[in-house]
Image: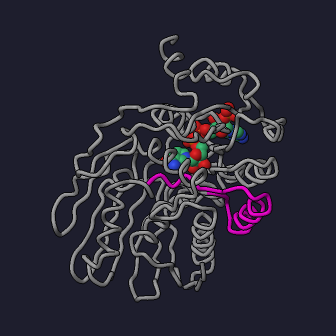
Amino acid sequence: MSSRRSFLQKLAAPIVALPLLSEKTKAGSINPLAMPYQGPVLRVAIMGLGSYGRRVADAMVACKKAKLTGVISGTPSKIKEWQSKFNIPEKNCYNYENFDQVKNNPDIDAVYVITPNALHHDQVIRVAKAGKHVICEKPMAINAKEGQEMVDACKAAKVKLLVGYRLHFEPKTLEIVRMRKDGELGKIMFFQGLSGFRAGDPTQWRLNKQLAGGGAMMDIGIYSINGSRYMVGEEPIWVTAQETKTDPVKFKAGVDETIQFQLGFPSGAVASCLSTYNMNNLDRFFLNGEKGFGELLPATGYGPIRGRTHKGELDQPHITHQTVQMEEMAGIILEGKQPIIPVDGEEGLRDLKIIDAIYAAVKEGRKVSLKV
Ligand code: NDP
C-alpha cells in the first residue's frame, strides 16, 4: 500500500510522463498517455463509491490530466478505504448532506456523479450551484424534463456538464465514425443495435423504478440509442417501440424488461434495436451503407471492443476506456478541447428525449414523431 501511496503522491500536479503504452500505438498514431506532460490537471471528486465509481477511480490512476482528489459517499467505511487507497485527505471527503461545501474547496475542480440514475438530477444541480464542473453517468437523468433542468442549471452556474459516454473516445468506434464521415460506407441505410444482459439480483436498485427511473432501456438500451446516433450521424425524427415482459414479478410496473424499438432518420436511414434485461450475449452494433459496412462486436463492454468493416478487421489498440475518457474530459474542461463525438449535457438530453419517445410509443402503441 505504501509504495502505491508514494506512487500516487508523485501524481500531484505538475504530472510527468506515465508510460502506459509505447509512444506509438499499433495503428501508428501518437499515444498521448505516453507523452511527457506538465500542464494543468483536473482534480476530481467521485460521488457514489459503488462498482462503477471504483472502476473509474482505478482507471484514473493512469491519467496524466485528471486526478482523483476527493470523495462523496454515504458510507463512512468506504470513505476510509478510498482515503487510504487513493491518498485522499480528510478535508476532501464529503457525504450527501454536506457536499455543497465543495464550493469552498480549491482542491476540487469537478465532481463525477456515479450514483443511481434517479439521484443524478438533484446531485448535479447541487454540484453546479457549488460552482464545480460536473461529469454525470448515463443516463444523465430519468427523463428529458429533468435533463433540461440540469443543462440549464449548469449553464446558469457557468460550469461544464459532461456525460460519461466512454465509447465516444473508443478507437474502433471512432474509426467506423471516420469511415462513415469520409463516405467510405456510402449512403447510410441501416443500423442495428443489440444491447442486453440478464439482470441478476431482483433487489438491486436497477430493478427499482424509484431509483432507476425505468428498466433495461435506462441502463443498457441507452447504448443502442446513443450508438445509433453517432453511427448513423443523424438525429432520429420518429420512433416505434414494442415491449415484451416475461417476468412481471421481477420486472415490476415501470421497469421494462425487453423493448424492441425502431428509429427513423431524416435521410431515410432506419435503426432497429433491442434493449433487454433478460438475455445475455447481446452487444452488437452494425452499420450498413450502400458501399460497405461497419460492425462492432462486442460494441459497448469494457473491452477490448472488436470490430470489422467491409475492408477487414479493425486493429486500433485497446486502452482502458475510463482512463481515456477522463484524460479527454480533462482536456475538454481545462483546454476547451472539442471531442469528435460530443459528450456534453445537450448530448445526454437528446438520448433522454428519445427514451421519453420510446416509452410513449410503447404506451400508446403508435409511431411517435420527435425533434431532438
Ligand atoms: P452501484 O450500486 O455499484 O453503486 C452506486 C453507488 O451510489 C452506491 O455504492 C452508493 O455509494 C451510491 N448511492 C447513493 N445513494 C444510493 C441509493 N439510494 N441506493 C444505492 N446506491 C446509492 O451502481 P453502479 O456503480 O453500477 O452505477 C452507478 C451509475 O453509473 C448508474 O447511473 C449507472 O447507469 C452508471 N454506470 C455506467 C457505466 C458505464 O459504463 N458508463 C457502467 C456501470 C454503471 P456510497 O455508498 O458511496 O454512497
In this image, 354 relative to 118: left or right?
A: left
Image location (x, y in percent) of residue 370: 60, 83
Which residue is more in the foreground, 286 or 213? 286
Q: Is residue 256 visible?
A: yes
**Which of the 4 image quarters holds residue 299?**
bottom left
Q: Residue at x 62, y 43 (%)?
A: 114
Q: Is residue 98 above or below residue 211?
A: above
Q: Nearer the viewer, residue 151 or 189?
A: 151
Assess whether residue 153 is covered by the magenta stretch. Answer: yes
Front residue of 217 and 227? 227
Quadrant of the picture in which ligand 1 is shown: top right
Decide if residue 66 is on the left or right side of residue 309. Answer: right
Query: Residue 321, how many percent across, how many down?
Result: 42, 45
Count all numbered tags in the image, as a single digit: 0
Q: Is residue 247 left or right of residue 231?
A: right
Name the image quarter holding the C terminus: bottom right
Q: Is residue 21 above or below residue 244?
A: above
Q: Is residue 239 above or below residue 30?
A: below
| Residue in the image at 53% along x and 57% along y | 216
Which segment did they paint magenta?
140-167
Q: Residue 212 appears at what percent x and percent y? A: 64, 52
- At 56% across and 47% down in the image, what residue appears? 330
Q: Is residue 125 magenta?
A: no
Residue drawn 49% across the image and 67% down it: 225
